[in-house]
Image (spheres, coloured by chain):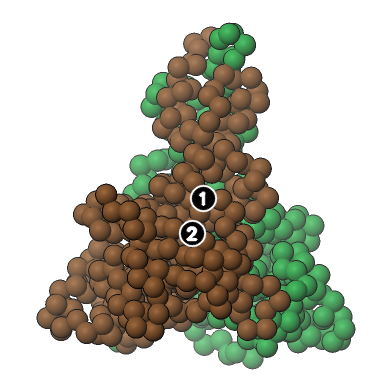
Chain colours: A brown, B green
Amino acid sequence: MNSTPIIDVKNVTYSYPYAEQPALNQISLQIMPDQWIAIVGHNGSGKSTLAKTFNGLIEPQSGEIYFNGELLSEETIWDVRRQLGIVFQNPDNQFVGATVADDVAFGMENNGVPREKMLVRVEEALKQVRMWDYRHQEPARLSGGQKQRVELAGVLAQRPKVIILDEATSMLDPQGRSEIIELMMQLREQGDFTIISITHDVDEAALADQIVLIDSGELITQGTPSEIFTQAERLHEHGLIVPLSEQVRTDLVAAGVGLPDKYLDETQLVDELWTLHSNM
Amino acid sequence: MDITFEHVNYTYQPNSPLATLGLKDINLKFTSGSYVAIIGQTGSGKSTLLQHLNALLRPSSGRVLIGDQAVMTTTKNKELHDLRRSVGLVFQFPESQLFEETVLKDVAFAPKNFGKSEAEATEIARDTLRLVGIDESLEDKMPFDLSGGQMRRVAIAGVLAMQPEVLVLDEPTAGLDPLGRQQIMQLFQRIHEERGITIILVTHQMDDVVAYADQAVVMSHGEIAKVGTPAEVFADLDWLTAHNLELPSTGRLVQRLQQKGFKFTRMPLTVNELLADLEPQLKRGSQLG
Ligand SMILES: Nc1ncnc2c1ncn2[C@@H]1O[C@H](COP(=O)(O)OP(=O)(O)OP(=O)(O)O)[C@@H](O)[C@H]1O
Ligand SMILES: Nc1ncnc2c1ncn2[C@@H]1O[C@H](COP(=O)(O)OP(=O)(O)O)[C@@H](O)[C@H]1O
Ligand SMILES: [Mg+2]
Ligand SMILES: [Mg+2]
């Protein structure tokens, strides 16, 4: 097993110009390769800022970031950007290509991928997000959810080792969202793929190996979904809620139903409830 | 103020190779004081429909009656001024709506534009910002220097400050944190009840449709696929799946419970309904020990 973190954040502090409070405050965090990490926190807690430090879009005033053991610096940054793709929140103003296909190709052009290879990858990525039929359209003329799919394709085409999804599915219909999650799982199965998802969707966070909770630019806690979701009050304090299964479990326990005193996902909850089923 | 669509068709870039169908023969009435949710697959025409509600888009054919103003292909912009004041639209991308140099000025813009004094407008803006959960420390920031969720809240405040009769919301809670989402949805509900304003909401959150809307409209490929109460719309699971939709989260849990063997005589759509139906089917904890 590889024990070098793919991303290692050491004591990072960052303040935006003129800001009274730092957006990131002495934060340290390790992300292991091939994991699915969910970063959660209320609006303005510092999630997107943190993500931007990973590929050097934001340079911290103090602290270090290591990517796969290598210190992020002017020399290493281009190499890191080839391996780490970010799908940004609100894709409205981020399109650069005249057509959807050009837009998806753009990132690869920057990274010097040969044209032949590029065409293959553009097609593959647009098919993965089901936007191939729109390849000749102008990105600005797409619907919100379609824009999000194209943004994602642009990053997938670069074949990153680490993908950061900053609320990348917030405008997709329910099935569209499940499809993207499914796709992420497949890619991870093929290996060498770390997923960092910044999300307000608790059900999506519940799928992660680890959940990282951030507030005021500080790491509040990190743990498995079951470790995090049994702390309902703490989550509430930080602007978050627990998944439905946990809400139902605690309500039933309060009503005197003998369920286990730990987080259960929906499948586990339904199984446990069935053992308590009575025909009366 | 009722809004009525009569045989409305809309085509983007007509007469060009990239012509795209936006809306097809829409007939629909939004009654004054109602709360209507519009749902449907990405690209199904929801935002296109919404932009007809305040005449940002004009029908390619057919007409939209907004109060007593008819909007058709040929309607002139100057006829639409009053209407834009009574119908407030929160866009799908909040950045596109923000333009002033500070958060406070941005929200004060509409009331000032509609005749309030500088001081009154500022006061309205402050009050509205507090309502959407933006505190004083952010008032002097540039809107573009906010986090995604903060920008969305400011955009919502900007429209609320107009005090419109009809509030049109395009996925207003996308990007809001869970508590923020609940608070903003409850805020809309309160304004709906207290001021009797009409709310028309596009959302992918089926839970919100059940919790707040009286009517749900399902769009599909530019057409209306179904109109009904949330209970009616969520009654047919196969039909929902065929339209890329799903049950509200409680409904999904109920479905799993049913597959196990639990019995439900109705489809519970809220947690309280679910608990009420489930508890009688369970052995009590005390009976175990
Ligand atoms: N470009 C900027 N200039 C100045 N301040 C900024 C800028 N971007 C963000 N901030 C501030 O930094 C803090 C953290 O913002 P960040 O965008 O990282 O939050 P977030 O956790 O991603 O929030 P959200 O859930 O709303 O996307 C907030 O207080 C925000 O107002
Ligand atoms: N400005 C535009 N120009 C051309 N086509 C557009 C434009 N905006 C949206 N469309 C297309 O119209 C259809 C409906 O889009 P939209 O109403 O935004 O969908 P929704 O809001 O339901 O996701 C989609 O196929 C979309 O690509
Ligand atoms: Mg963010
Ligand atoms: Mg839309």
Residue under label 2, please give it: A29
Q: Quadrant of the C terminus of chain B?
A: top right
Query: For numbered disc 2, what is the local secondary structure?
Result: strand
Q: Looking at the picture, how far across and down is residue B258, in whole percent?
A: 43, 26
Going by the image, does B27 lie left or right of A189? right
* Quadrant of residue B285 within the rendered picture: top right
Going by the image, does A254 lie left or right of B93? right
Q: Amino acid at mark 1?
A: Gln
Q: Residue at x 82, y 81 (%)?
A: B121
Chain of the residue displaying label 1: A
Q: Quadrant of the N terminus of chain B?
A: bottom right
Q: Residue at x 40, y 63 (%)?
A: A7
Compared with residue B33, is residue B255 higher up or lower down, i.e. above or below? above
Q: Which mark is residue A222?
A: 1
Q: Is residue B204 visible?
A: no
* Quadrant of residue A62 within the rendered picture: bottom right
Is there CB contact under 8 Å for labels 2 and 1? Answer: yes
Q: Residue at x 64, y 63 (%)?
A: A216
Compared with residue B139, is residue B262 higher up or lower down, i.e. above or below? above
